[in-house]
Image (cartoon, rainbow, N blue to C red):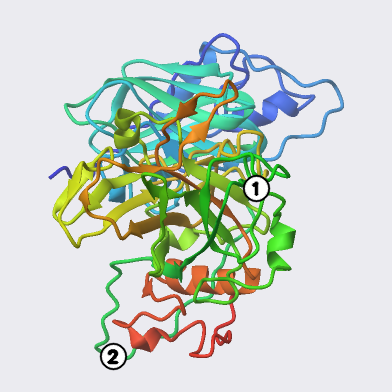
């Protein structure tokens, strides 16, 4: 078990030749008419003391502070603008050590990487910021060599500081620059472990704070009640209500142009459907009437005959990230698809949404439809959709670039908004010899016929108030909910919808 370091040696590091400021307090020099090149900083970060000031002086001797034009106003004092921002990393040691732990303002939590030299951690400041310096609060596993980089677009990076010979502890790195994104790229470990940071603090001015998300809390549990969080989900149950050679997402306005799809949820989905038309539709085959969303997938066939299950199918709405309290409801109008008709068996096996592959009876982890299923069993497949939204687009040209899968339990900085992770669990009443069982084939432009792999589409048709209530109560509340939003194992938490389907728990 590694323990927290108690020595706090501040290490000021000379930045590359274009670094403008010498230290935290030298930040003001870059914007002050009275600042002089080579000026010595008056104080180090916080109360680090004379040792830190001496180290800062060493850094200042290798850098040149750039004075702002005469008449410029004095710059605001830099503060930690990384706290609470979206962070991501190349890896995480486990679910309790994800990147967000390094920017949560809690000195008892930490980010920890896997055990290799080449790693990184990155923070999205929300908007362009003027950056002065970083403070890295290391656990025992520290970085010996690394660079600090900034970017305005999360694509083109500029190195503003280079560190060699790091010793851990509380490490201050002069790293003046400008950008929305800050990345620390590690190249050499100081121990045999990975890298472990209690806090990554970025001192500067600017950036922006995301709109606060404050879901309504659950009621207080009675004394002795079980409050253990094991799930953070609710489920929908819907039946297939029609099939069509339509695809309103990929081939909108072109009836009959698609391979055959089975439609669940909204009763009126067709090639011309839009989120607005779904809400105005006649009804839904889901057990919650306020869910008029459209869910569709390629129809299953045995030979030329369609296989349609009369049973309720299960659609889970889960947290795809570790910090389930951050999951937002889908925005109105969102649509996307998951999986791909073009996947090979190996691509399907290794796709981020794959759960157990094709299943029947005791046969699991099949990456193609099994050749045989025990008589009386059912064919099943489960697949998870991406659950990180870019926060901007309700759809994109490829119908998927606005969505992304979490990385190491967190949403990446280019898709910072966590939304519910849909996991469809679909079944078909088919067993025995499966050699003629297949998904609806696709006719290509040249007239050839192509077999397809598993995929499905979603178009949001929810009553947004009810979706928000279910998301806040069940996902943010850490419950395992039925479609009506009650956890049978935690009745003290209450319900979202009553037996008649009326909303009785208002979201925040």
Q: Is residue 247 above or below residue 64?
A: below
Classify residue 446 by image quadrant.
Answer: top right
Q: Residues within 10 Å of mark 2 (few under 14, many from 20)?
A: few
Residue 248 got which mark? 1
Give the quadrant of residue 315.
Answer: bottom left
SS for callout 1 = loop
- Which quadrant: the C terminus? bottom right
Q: Is residue 386 left or right of residue 322?
A: right
Nearest-to-viewer mark from 2 and 1:
1
Toward the front, the furthest residue is 304
- Is 241 positioned to the left or the right of 396 in the image? left
Q: Earlier in the sequence, mark 2 or mark 1?
A: 2
Q: Element under label 2?
A: loop
Is residue 166 visible in this depiction of the protein? no
Callout 1: 10 Å neighbours few (<14), some, many (20+)? many
Q: Quadrant of the N terminus?
A: top left
Mark 2–mark 1 Cα distance, whole angstroms, equals: 51 Å
Residue lying at 58% horizontally and 62% vertically, measured from the top left: 213
Of residues 496 and 171, the one drawn nearer to the viewer in this rendering: 496
Q: Is residue 298 shown to the viewer in this render?
A: yes
Residue closer to the observer: 240 or 433: 433
From the image, tell me which residue sits under label 2: 223
Residue situated in front as seen by the camera: 459 or 81: 459
Kindly identify the residue that appears in the image at 45 percent across and 56 percent down: 422
Question: Where residue 138 sits: x, y (%)?
Answer: 32, 37
């Amino acid at each position: 078990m590694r323990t927290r370091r108690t020595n706090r040696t501040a290490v000021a590091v000379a930045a590359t030749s274009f670094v403008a400021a010498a230290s935290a307090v030298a930040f003001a020099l870059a914007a002050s008419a009275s600042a002089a090149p080579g000026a010595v900083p008056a104080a180090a970060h916080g109360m680090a003391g004379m040792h830190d000031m001496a180290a800062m002086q060493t850094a200042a001797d290798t850098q040149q502070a750039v004075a702002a034009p005469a008449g410029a106003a004095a710059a605001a004092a830099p503060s930690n603008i990384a706290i609470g921002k979206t962070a991501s990393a190349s890896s995480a040691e486990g679910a309790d050590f994800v990147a967000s732990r390094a920017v949560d303002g809690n000195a008892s939590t930490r980010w920890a990487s896997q055990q290799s030299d080449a790693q990184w951690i990155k923070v999205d400041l929300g908007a362009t910021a003027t950056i002065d310096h970083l403070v890295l609060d290391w656990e025992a596993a520290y970085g010996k060599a690394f660079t600090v980089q900034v970017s305005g677009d999360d694509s083109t990076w500029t190195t503003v500081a280079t560190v060699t010979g790091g010793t851990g502890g509380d490490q201050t790195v002069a790293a003046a620059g400008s950008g929305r994104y800050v990345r620390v790229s590690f190249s050499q470990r100081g121990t045999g472990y990975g890298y472990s940071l209690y806090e990554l603090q970025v001192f500067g001015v600017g950036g922006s704070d995301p709109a606060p998300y404050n879901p309504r809390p659950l009621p207080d549990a009675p004394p002795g009640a079980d409050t253990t969080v094991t799930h953070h989900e609710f489920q929908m149950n819907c039946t297939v209500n029609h099939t069509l050679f339509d695809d309103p997402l990929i081939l909108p306005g072109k009836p009959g142009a698609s391979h055959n799809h089975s439609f669940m949820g909204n009763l009126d989905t067709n090639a011309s459907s839009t989120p607005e038309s779904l809400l105005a539709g006649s009804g839904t085959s889901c057990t919650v009437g306020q869910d008029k969303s459209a869910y569709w997938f390629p129809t299953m066939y045995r030979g030329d005959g369609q296989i349609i299950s009369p049973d309720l199918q299960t659609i889970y709405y889960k947290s795809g990230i570790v910090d389930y309290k951050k999951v937002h409801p889908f925005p109105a109008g969102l649509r996307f698809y998951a999986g791909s008709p073009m996947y090979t068996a190996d691509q399907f096996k290794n796709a981020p949404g794959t759960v157990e592959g094709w299943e029947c009876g005791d046969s699991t982890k099949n990456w193609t439809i099994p050749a045989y299923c025990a008589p009386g069993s059912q064919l099943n497949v489960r697949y998870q959709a991406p659950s990180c939204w870019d926060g901007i687009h309700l759809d994109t040209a490829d119908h998927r670039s606005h969505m992304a899968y979490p990385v190491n339990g967190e949403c990446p900085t280019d898709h910072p908004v966590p939304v519910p992770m849909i996991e469809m669990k679909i079944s078909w009443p088919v067993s025995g010899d499966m050699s003629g069982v297949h998904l609806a084939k696709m006719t290509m432009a040249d007239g050839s016929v192509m077999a397809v792999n598993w995929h499905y589409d979603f178009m949001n048709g929810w009553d947004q108030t009810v979706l928000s209530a279910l998301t806040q109560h069940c996902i943010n509340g850490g419950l395992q909910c039925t479609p009506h939003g009650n956890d049978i194992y935690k009745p003290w938490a209450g319900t979202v919808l009553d037996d008649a389907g009326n909303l009785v728990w208002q979201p925040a």
